[in-house]
Amino acid sequence: MIDTLKQDIRDYLEKTLEARFQQVIPVVVEEPKKADQGDLSVPVFSIVKELRQPLPLITQLVKQLLLEGELSTMIDHIDVMGGFVNVHFDKKAMADQIIANFTRDLLNNQLGSSNEGVGKTIVMDYSSPNIAKTFSIGHLRSTIIGHAIGNLLEKCGYHVVRINHLGDWGTQFGKIIYAYLHYGDPAKVEANPIEELVKLYVDFHEREKQDPNLEVEARAVFKGLEDRNPQYLALWEKFREVSLQEYMKIYDLLGVRFDSYAGEASYVDKTDAIIEELTAKGLLVEDQGAMIVDLGDIAPALIQKSDGTTLYFTRELAALFFRKREYDFDKVLYVVGNEQKLHFEQLRRVVDKMGYDFPEDIIHVNFGLVLQDGKKMSTRKGKIVKLIDVLEEAISMSLSYIGDKNPDLENKEEIAKKIGTSAIIFNDLKNYRVNDFEFNLDDMVNFNGQTGPYLQYTSVRITSILATSPIDSSRINEDVFLDEVAFDMLKEISLYQDTISRAAREFAPSILAKYLLHLASLFNSYYGKERIVVEDSMERNAKFLLLFMVRAVLDDGMKLLGMQVIEKM
Ligand code: ARG
């Protein structure tokens, strides 16, 4: 709301000044730091400079123009302090406007929506675990962050294509298949696929230390796989399928879905064309038997190994061009950890060297590590952390918490699932993605801190208050909105759409997460100082309406982040 008014005032003044003086005069409108300087302030220095007139004359002129304009109905009074024209809005008029806008958006199912992305497509590549390997905490971050960004972009009108670029190809499959064929136990793999395959892989590396020849053998198997040896292919397909089944359990818990699960393997047959193009453009050079693209100041891009097999980078290039053709994207986002910075820089550089005009549209949405006791969280007491265990731990903590608080609650298990997973999701998203963060389940599953459960709990608390009586929004005592905290809540609500746009533009769900925390804490301080369920129906209606709006925004925001909303707890 304030943002819209700011824009409106600027546009109005620029237009009127231009009409009057026949010249373009840029106008600045800002939000003053101090409350006594009004809600918005116009520093007139730029206007003085353009028009070369005395400052007092210009401040009076601006004040006059504002009082004559259409926005004057929103203005309570204007005062002038030095070179600043300070506008104080009429709180009731603003409250009216905010409520009207909110109601309109809610009825049109457009709360927080905008149309900046209409007609544009964004391809998103996230989650992307490696088959026959454990789903790591890093893949979890990618999944959570990618999912939220996708939702934010859709809210802004973009067409979003969600791709899980499975790591289902590469030399490691030579090793796994070799190990499986030589000393794998099919029954064990059947029973516990990922764990067994990981064991075989680790085992292979142990044996390789004794017998360096194993590496050569494994490479031959991978070469065979690339040449479509039917036995190897069948095994590969099986490993892929069982792995995906495991990952689906995690996606189900998180409520995450993809439009495509086309992994690296699906681009193998498209790499020849890439290599031909690179050759034709004179970009490919030989380096110790391998083919590379020299990138000058950064490490060269590896395109083909000496035995002719493909590489991660080559499959990446093939995937990129495929996506460009298939989806004609405006941008492609790769939600991948900081460790792969160089890889994506190389990708951009190679595309640039090939003469295409879209390297700028290739965006590495990078993120930091998850730490435990200050160290990278991937192993615990020497064992690999299984993500599903972590999720289940969070759920059982939530369950015991509700069990203590509200033993008679129905559907406890269902609710605990929603609390536990949302706790993990929110804890991740409240941190700016590029930073590392410390993983502590006790802090996450806590109803009082800056947590997911705190947001869910705030929404539930509002629900139970609203259940006490219906709201008649036509009979309202607007004096309720003059209270400072109440008015702050309204202003915050009016910033919802703008917050989403900013979060989407910066690919930073943390902007929305922090906003929701702030809104929840405003409500909680209001609730702490104010009686809500009062006798006077006009006063109660106004308060209930305010709460209703807060809850609608909280719920909508939580869903965007990928969290679940709860009715009772
Ligand atoms: N599978 C890769 C890994 O686990 C991530 C792939 C990310 N996406 C991509 N297009 N490179 O490291």
Image (cartoon, rainbow, N blue to C red):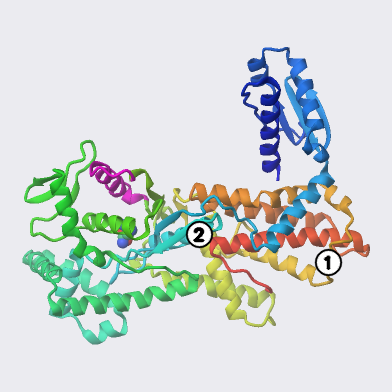
- Residue 81 in picture, x, y percent from top left: 77, 22
Residue count near mark 1 (Cα–Cα under 10 Å), binned few <14, some 14–19, many ≥20? some
Residue 435 relative to residue 306: left or right: right
Examine the image and state in which quarter residue 523 appears.
Answer: bottom right
Tag shown at residue 148: 2
Q: How far apart are marks 2 and 1 (CA)?
A: 33 Å
Amino acid type, residue under disc 1 in the picture: Ile
Q: Which residue is drawn at 30% across and 79% down?
A: 193
Q: Name the residue under label 1.
A: 471
Q: Tell which residue pokes out farthest to the bottom in this image.
A: 187
- Residue 220 in picture, x, y percent from top left: 8, 68
User: Which quarter of the rendered image does ligand 1 occupy?
Assistant: bottom left
Q: Nearer the viewer, residue 371 or 130?
A: 130
Point out the stretch of residues depicted in magenta.
338-358
Q: Which residue is drawn at 52% across and 64% down?
A: 424
In the figure, 427 relative to 211: above or below?
A: above
- Disc 1 C-beta below 8 A from ligand 1: no
Q: Would residue 345 be counted in the magenta stretch?
A: yes
Total numbered badges shown on the rendered structure? 2
The answer, for residue 380, to whether it is visible in the render is no
Examine the image and state in which quarter residue 18 appears.
Answer: top right
Q: Would residue 252 be counted in the magenta stretch?
A: no
Q: Magenta region, mostly helix, strand or loop?
A: helix
Q: Nearer the viewer, residue 20 or 169?
A: 20
- Residue 92 in picture, x, y percent from top left: 84, 46
The answer, for residue 267, to whether it is visible in the render is yes
Q: Residue at x 60, y 62 (%)?
A: 558
Amino acid type, residue under disc 2 in the picture: Ala
Residue 434 relative to residue 238: left or right: right
Please report contact status of discs 2 and 1: CB closer than 8 Å, yes or no: no
State the quadrant of the C terminus.
Answer: bottom right
